[in-house]
Amino acid sequence: MNNTLGQPNNITGLGGLAGNRIILRRLRVVDVTQRYVDWLNDPEVNRFLSVKDKHQDMDMVKKYVLSYEGENNKLLLGIFDNKNNLHIGNITFSSINQDHGVGVIGIAIGEKDCWGRGYATEALLLVVDFAFAKLKLQRLEAGVSEDNSPSQKLFKKVGFEECERANGKLKFMISNSEEKKNASKKPV
Ligand SMILES: CC(C)(COP(=O)(O)OP(=O)(O)OC[C@H]1O[C@@H](n2cnc3c(N)ncnc32)[C@H](O)[C@@H]1OP(=O)(O)O)[C@@H](O)C(=O)NCCC(=O)NCCS
């Protein structure tokens, strides 16, 4: 199934990614609602996020969203429930280096009613597929706190493997299976 709403081979032209229950699309300043700001300030949501260190307001969040505009090595995608168009979370895709084939992924589901219902799994699968199939990246990485077991389970479920542990953080990684297949075909 082709679930890419745009047909880019880079992030600049990405229209969106459609799953069964969600749409991922670039977050814009007009998407910044008080509800979104409130989840960033919720200690249960932000416990493992860098925003926990500074109380967020509308202006700060708008500036953050704007900081992604026009960038071609990072992407901020909103996760929207396609039934009611509710903005339920975000995926960040940063340090995208198409020359070196690497990108770093972060995820948060801010609507707590949506936790444990498979939304993050669906969103991550879409982004991983996009990164490998369209951007032709070879490797994706994610940093997860040792104490964040839901997030560790999530990344493992999607196929990431733990590859490093330092200073209370785990590094997870997934490689493009096509690359693996091609590597195994190379003569020794
Ligand atoms: C971590 C987070 C993204 C998971 O999102 P989610 O939509 O609830 O995840 P899913 O429903 O897709 O579940 C994926 C797996 O995670 C695990 N999981 C989810 N919530 C869990 C919980 N509260 N406790 C234990 N495991 C949990 C489950 O094992 C699940 O796999 P399963 O369906 O086979 O049981 C979400 O809890 C969140 O945004 N938390 C706050 C921000 C955060 O910590 N972000 C990650 C920073 S690295």
Image: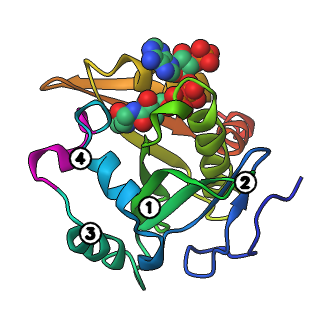
**Residue 64 sits inside the magenta stretch:** no
Q: Spatial distance from mark 4 to mark 2, Cα to Cα?
A: 25 Å
Which corner quadrant of the image does residue 149 belong to? top left
- Asked whether the viewer can see residue 153, the reply is no
The residue that mark 1 highlights is 100
Residue 31 percent location from the top left of the image: 47, 70
The residue that mark 2 highlights is 82
- In this rendering, the answer to whether 179 lies above or below 167 is below
Question: Which range is magenta?
Answer: 46-55
The reply to whether dot 3 and dot 1 touch (C-beta < 8 Å) is no
Residue 70 percent location from the top left of the image: 42, 85
Q: Counting residues from the N terminus, which is met first, the one under dot 3 or under dot 1?
A: 3
The reply to whether dot 2 and dot 1 touch (C-beta < 8 Å) is no
Q: Which amino acid type corresponds to the residue marked 1 in the rendered image?
A: His
- Tell me the quarter of the image containing the C terminus: top right
Q: Residue at x 42, y 56 (%)?
A: 92
Residue 146 percent location from the top left of the image: 26, 19
Element carrying mark 2: loop
Q: Counting residues from the N terminus, which is met first, the one under dot 2 or under dot 3?
A: 3
Q: Which amino acid type corresponds to the residue marked 2 in the rendered image?
A: Asn
The reply to whether dot 4 and dot 3 touch (C-beta < 8 Å) is no
The residue that mark 3 highlights is 58
- Packing grade of label 1 (10 A; few <14, some 14-19, many >=20) is few
Rendered image: mark on residue 41: 4
